[in-house]
Image: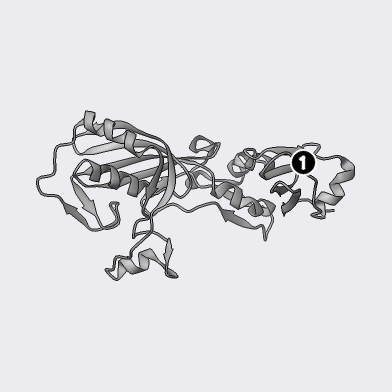
């Protein structure tokens, strides 16, 4: 990789978590916003009958007295109440800012801050295994969803508590863990085999093809006429990704230009 190449990412993982992290290189760093907001999938393992101040095993664990026995039938039935669009309150152990301060900083001082609930979408919430108080789930959700909170809210609906003991991110948009390489296995050869072409990173966006003559204008960021799409879309010429434009219904304007005039 050339010296001075820009390297970025599209979202960190919690200390407890493992799994897929998308790294972006060079000009592709300009596209991070279009990946950060993609849907994500996880495999999460939780322990019921106890609570944690961070909602995961990294925090202070408090067993619950007389916690009810977890029944598979009741658990599966409750899952349906947490799919679709739901309201979720960010956990205190998070980087969300309230009043200009990260929530986790207040938590370290032993403080609890009032937080506003916000809508998230849970596409799938499935029980994979149940072994007494330990359960493993598959979750597919919108960006910004806290799986820790999802599991904690599920437990509360069953009159008990729960916290995460493991979390693995398995996909970001169309990119999956199977496409990735563990850091310890990275070599120059494996790295280049795993590189995703810049055009494929935003394959989820609709695309518009422009002529060779229009290419110059696009590479200079000039506005385009109505695209027929609302929102962001790819602009390409001959299979080359030139730019990302956005159309609000009155013509399209450049958001990110990747090509040189």
Asked whether, in this view, residue 175 is left or right of residue 252, the answer is left
With respect to residue 53, does 120 lie above or below?
above
Mark 1, secondary structure of its residue = strand
Residue 214 visible in the shown view: yes
Q: Is residue 220 left or right of residue 120?
A: right
Residue 237 position by quadrant: top right
How many dots with numbers? 1
Asked if residue 248 lies left or right of residue 71, the reply is: right
Furthest residue in direction right, as rendered: 213
Give the x, y percent position of residue 43: 38, 38
Instruction: Read off the residue under disc 1.
Output: 236
Percent x, y of residue 231: 65, 45
Answer few, some or many: residues within 10 Å of disc 1's Cα (few below 14, many 20 plus, some between 14 and 19).
many
Q: Residue at image x 25%, y 34%?
A: 75
Asked if residue 110 is positioned above or below residue 247 in the image, the reply reads below
64 to the left or right of 200:
left
**Residue 257 visible in this rendered orientation of the protein:** no
Percent across and percent down for residue 34 are: 60, 48
Q: Position of residue 94 (x, y in %)?
A: 39, 59
Front residue of 8/163: it is 163
Q: Extreme top residue here?
A: 73
């Amino acid at each position: 990789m050339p010296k001075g190449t820009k390297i970025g990412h599209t979202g960190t993982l919690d200390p407890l978590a493992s799994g897929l992290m998308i790294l972006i290189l060079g000009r592709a760093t300009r596209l991070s916003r279009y990946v950060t907001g993609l849907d994500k999938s996880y495999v999460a393992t939780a322990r019921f009958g106890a609570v944690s101040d961070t909602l995961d095993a990294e925090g202070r664990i408090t067993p619950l007295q007389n916690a009810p026995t977890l029944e598979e039938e009741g658990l599966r039935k409750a899952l349906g109440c947490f799919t679709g669009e739901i309201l979720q309150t960010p956990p205190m152990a998070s980087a969300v800012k309230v009043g200009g301060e990260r929530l986790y900083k207040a938590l370290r001082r032993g403080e609890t801050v009032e937080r506003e609930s916000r809508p998230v979408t849970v596409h799938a919430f499935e029980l994979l295994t149940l072994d007494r108080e330990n359960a493993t789930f598959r979750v597919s959700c919108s960006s910004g969803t806290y799986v820790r909170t999802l599991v904690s809210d599920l437990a509360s609906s069953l009159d008990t508590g729960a916290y995460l003991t493991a979390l693995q991110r398995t996909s970001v948009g169309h990119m999956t863990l199977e496409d990735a390489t563990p850091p310890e296995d990275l070599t120059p050869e494996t790295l280049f085999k795993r590189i995703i072409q810049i055009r494929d990173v935003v394959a989820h966006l609709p695309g518009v093809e422009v002529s060779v003559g229009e290419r110059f204008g696009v590479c200079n960021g000039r506005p385009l006429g109505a695209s027929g799409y609302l929102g962001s879309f790819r602009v390409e010429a001959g299979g080359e990704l030139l730019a990302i434009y956005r159309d609000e219904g009155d013509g399209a304007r450049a958001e990110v230009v990747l090509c040189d005039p």
